[in-house]
Image: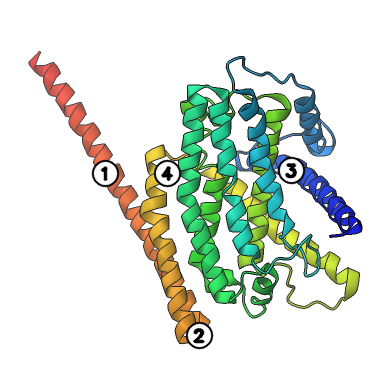
C-alpha cells in the first residue's frame, strides 16, 4: 500500500466516523419521537424545531460532564473497555456497501468478516464489568457475555442461509441475487431469526437483560459516566444502524430499485437514499418493539435462545439446503419457511397460555389455602 492509498483510506475512515456520529444523533431524536408517539406524548420540543437540537445538547452535556474513575477500579481495563466495544462496531463498516460502488473495501468474504468481527464486542462488555470492580457490573457483564454468545448462533446461521441462497459471501453478490425477489419473501423465517438475534446482540428491549436497572443497577456500565459512558452509548446506536442496514442488504434487496432510469452519480445517490429508506423502516420497527414489549427475565431470555431460536436456525439451514441442492423453485422455500414460522408462533402462544393458566391455578390454590387456614384459626 502506498502513502497515497493510506491517506485515502484514512480520509474515508474519518468520513465514515463523521457519518456514523451524525446518524447516532439522528437516531436518538427519532427514537424519542417514535416512543413518544407510541405512548401518546409529544417528545422533545424545546431545543430546536420539534427538539431537533436536543441530541446535540445531550452530546455536549456528556462531553462536558465530569468523568469519574472509581478508586477501586482496574484503570487499564476500565479505560480500554469502551474502545473494545466501539472499535468492532466501527470496523464492521469497512466492508458494508451502501451502493454498488460506495464502500470502503469490498471483500469477497464480507459476510464472514462481519460474523467474525461482531463477536468481539462481547469482550468489551466483560472488560467493563470486570474493570469496574463492582459486583453488579460484573453480573451485568457476565449476563451480556452469555446472552451474546447464545444469540450469536442463530445470527450466524441466518447469515449462512442467505449465503447458501446467493452462493456467495460477498454483499454485492447477495444484493444482486435479489434482482428477482427479495430474500425476505423467500426466507421469512430467516428474516425473523436475523432480526430477533440482532436485537438480542444489541441488548435492546425486550432483550436488554444485562442493562436491567431493576436487577443489576445499569449493568456493566454502572460505574461509567461522561465521555466514556457516551462511547458505549455511541456503539449501541451504531450497532442498531448496522443491524438495520444489514437487514436491508440481506433480506430487502439492498439498494436495488424496481426500475432505475438514471446512471452515474445520480444512480449512486438514489441508491444510497433507497437503502437508507429501507434501513430506517427497519429502525422504526426496532423502536416499535422497544415501546411495545416488556423485558424478558434472564431464564426466559436464555430459554428463548437455546430452546427456540437455535433449533429454528438449524431447521432453516436444512430446508434451504434441500431446496437449493435439489433445484426446487424458490416458492417452495417460501411456503416451508412461512409454515415453520406460523407453527412456531402458535407453539409460543400455546405455551404462554399454558403458563398463565398454571400461574392462575397456583394463585387460586394459595388463596384457598390462606382462606382455609384463616377459617381454622
The residue sitting at 43% across, 74% down in the picture is: 319
Q: Residues within 10 Å of mark 3 (few under 14, many from 20)?
A: many
Which residue is most to the front? 2
User: Observer-nearest residue: 286 or 145?
Assistant: 145
Above or below residue 226? Residue 127 is: below
Q: Secondary structure at mark 1?
A: helix
Above or below residue 19? Residue 127 is: above
- How many numbered marks appear? 4
Residue that numbered label 3 is attached to: 24
Residue that numbered label 1 is attached to: 357
Question: Which colour scheme appears in the figure?
Answer: rainbow
On the image, the x and y values in percent for residue 48 come to: 85, 34
Marks 1 and 2, Cα distance to the nearest angstrom?
Answer: 43 Å
Q: In this rendering, would 347 be left or right of 367?
A: right
Which circle's residue, 1 or 2, is located before the other in the chain?
2
Residue that numbered label 2 is attached to: 329
Amino acid at each position: 500500500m502506498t502513502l497515497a492509498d493510506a491517506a485515502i483510506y484514512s480520509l474515508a475512515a474519518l468520513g465514515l466516523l463523521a457519518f456514523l456520529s451524525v446518524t447516532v444523533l439522528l437516531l436518538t431524536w427519532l427514537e424519542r419521537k417514535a416512543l413518544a408517539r407510541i405512548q401518546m406524548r409529544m417528545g422533545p420540543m424545546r431545543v430546536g424545531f420539534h427538539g431537533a437540537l436536543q441530541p446535540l445538547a445531550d452530546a455536549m452535556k456528556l462531553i462536558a460532564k465530569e468523568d469519574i474513575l472509581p478508586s477501586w477500579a482496574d484503570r487499564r481495563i476500565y479505560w480500554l473497555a469502551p474502545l473494545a466495544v466501539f472499535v468492532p462496531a466501527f470496523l464492521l463498516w469497512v466492508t458494508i456497501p451502501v451502493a454498488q460502488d460506495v464502500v470502503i473495501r469490498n471483500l469477497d468474504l464480507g459476510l464472514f468478516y462481519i460474523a467474525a468481527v461482531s463477536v468481539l464486542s462481547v469482550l468489551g462488555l466483560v472488560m467493563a464489568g470486570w474493570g469496574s470492580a463492582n459486583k453488579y457490573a460484573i453480573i451485568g457483564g457476565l449476563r451480556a457475555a452469555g446472552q451474546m454468545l447464545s444469540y450469536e448462533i442463530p445470527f450466524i446461521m441466518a447469515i449462512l442461509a442467505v449465503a447458501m441462497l446467493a452462493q456467495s459471501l460477498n454483499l454485492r453478490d447477495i444484493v444482486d441475487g435479489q434482482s428477482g425477489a427479495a430474500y425476505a419473501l423467500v426466507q421469512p423465517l430467516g428474516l425473523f431469526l436475523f432480526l430477533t438475534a440482532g436485537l438480542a446482540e444489541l441488548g435492546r428491549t425486550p432483550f436488554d437483560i444485562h442493562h436491567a436497572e431493576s436487577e443489576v443497577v445499569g449493568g456493566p456500565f454502572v460505574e461509567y459516566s461522561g465521555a466514556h459512558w457516551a462511547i458505549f452509548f455511541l456503539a449501541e446506536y451504531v450497532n442498531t444502524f448496522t443491524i438495520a442496514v444489514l437487514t436491508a442488504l440481506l433480506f430487502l434487496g439492498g439498494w436495488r430499485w424496481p426500475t432505475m432510469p438514471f446512471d452515474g452519480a445520480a444512480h449512486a445517490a438514489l441508491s444510497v437514499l433507497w437503502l437508507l429508506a429501507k434501513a430506517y423502516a427497519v429502525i422504526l420497527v426496532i423502536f416499535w418493539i422497544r415501546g411495545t414489549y416488556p423485558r424478558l427475565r434472564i431464564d426466559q431470555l436464555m430459554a428463548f435462545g437455546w430452546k427456540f431460536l437455535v433449533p429454528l436456525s438449524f431447521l432453516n439451514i436444512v430446508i434451504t439446503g434441500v431446496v437449493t441442492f435439489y433445484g426446487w423453485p424458490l416458492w417452495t422455500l417460501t411456503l416451508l419457511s412461512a409454515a415453520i414460522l406460523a407453527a412456531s408462533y402458535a407453539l409460543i402462544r400455546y405455551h404462554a397460555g399454558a403458563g398463565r393458566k398454571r400461574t392462575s391455578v397456583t394463585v387460586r390454590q394459595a388463596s384457598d389455602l390462606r382462606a382455609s387456614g384463616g377459617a381454622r384459626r
